[in-house]
Image (cartoon, grey):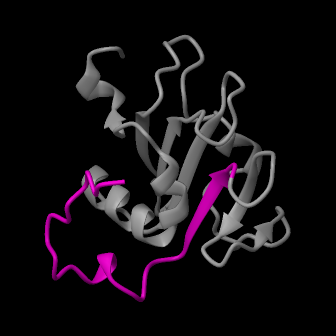
């Protein structure tokens, strides 16, 4: 897939290794929605950092409004307790309704940089996406 999120600043240290602590919640290496490290390690609530910004259950749609249309790629981007969370509806790995992907990065990043970092940290997840990731506020649907 073409890189739809060019880096705003190619010299920014956060877009090249070493990356910030980063995690992915969704369908990746096995069926089902789980939390993974960049190395593919499956994580449980006992293995996340002590300062992890939320409960693991919140990563499975908790940052997306169930009252709004579930359009693939419509994203929520929030900062919470020193972390950045990017969550969007995604049925590319699981076709069931309410399937989503969520990226959690330590540190505070703007939307475009969050997408660029997450894409570099989890390239196989991003390669399967066949749709753009767009902030919900920019689409006019809430």
Q: Is residue 80 above or below residue 134?
A: below
Q: Is residue 98 above or below residue 78?
A: above
Q: Which picture quadrant has residue 124?
A: bottom right
Q: Is residue 2 above or below residue 88?
A: below
> Residue furthest toward the bottom?
18
Kindly identify the residue that appears in the image at 36 percent across and 58 percent down: 114
Task: State whether the magenta stretch is mostly helix, strand or loop.
Answer: loop
Kindly identify the residue that appears in the image at 43 percent across and 34 percent down: 73
The quadrant the C terminus occupies is top left
Q: How many marks?
A: 0
Q: Position of residue 129 (x, y in %)?
A: 47, 45
Which of 81/69 is in front? Answer: 69
Query: Is 14 colored magenta in this rendering?
Result: yes
Query: Which span of residues is magenta-colored?
Result: 1-27
Which of 100/53 is in front? Answer: 100
The quadrant the N terminus occupies is bottom left
Q: Position of residue 84 (x, y in %)?
A: 45, 57
Which of 82/65 is in front? Answer: 65
Q: Which picture quadrant has residue 134?
A: top left
Left or right, residue 89 beside residue 45: left
Q: Position of residue 62 (x, y in %)?
A: 64, 34
> Residue furthest toward the front?
1
Kindly identify the residue that appears in the image at 80 percent across and 45 percent down: 32
Q: Which picture quadrant has residue 7?
A: bottom left
Q: Position of residue 12 (x, y in %)?
A: 21, 79
Kindly identify the residue that appears in the image at 50 percent across and 37 percent down: 88
Query: Is 5 colored magenta in this rendering?
Result: yes
Left or right, residue 23 beside residue 110: right
Left or right, residue 76 beside residue 60: left
């Amino acid at each position: 897939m073409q890189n739809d999120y060019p880096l705003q600043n190619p010299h920014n240290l956060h877009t090249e290794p070493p990356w910030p602590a980063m995690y992915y919640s969704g369908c990746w290496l096995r069926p089902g929605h789980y939390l993974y490290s960049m190395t593919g390690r499956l994580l449980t609530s006992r293995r996340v950092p002590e300062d992890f910004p939320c409960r693991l259950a919140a990563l499975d749609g908790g940052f997306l409004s169930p009252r709004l249309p579930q359009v693939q790629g419509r994203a929520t981007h929030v900062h919470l307790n020193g972390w950045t969370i990017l969550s969007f509806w995604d049925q590319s790995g699981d076709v069931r309704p309410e399937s989503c992907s969520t990226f959690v990065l330590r540190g505070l990043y703007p939307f475009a940089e969050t997408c660029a970092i997450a894409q570099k940290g989890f390239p196989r997840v991003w390669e399967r996406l066949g749709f753009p990731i767009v902030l919900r506020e920019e689409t006019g649907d809430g």
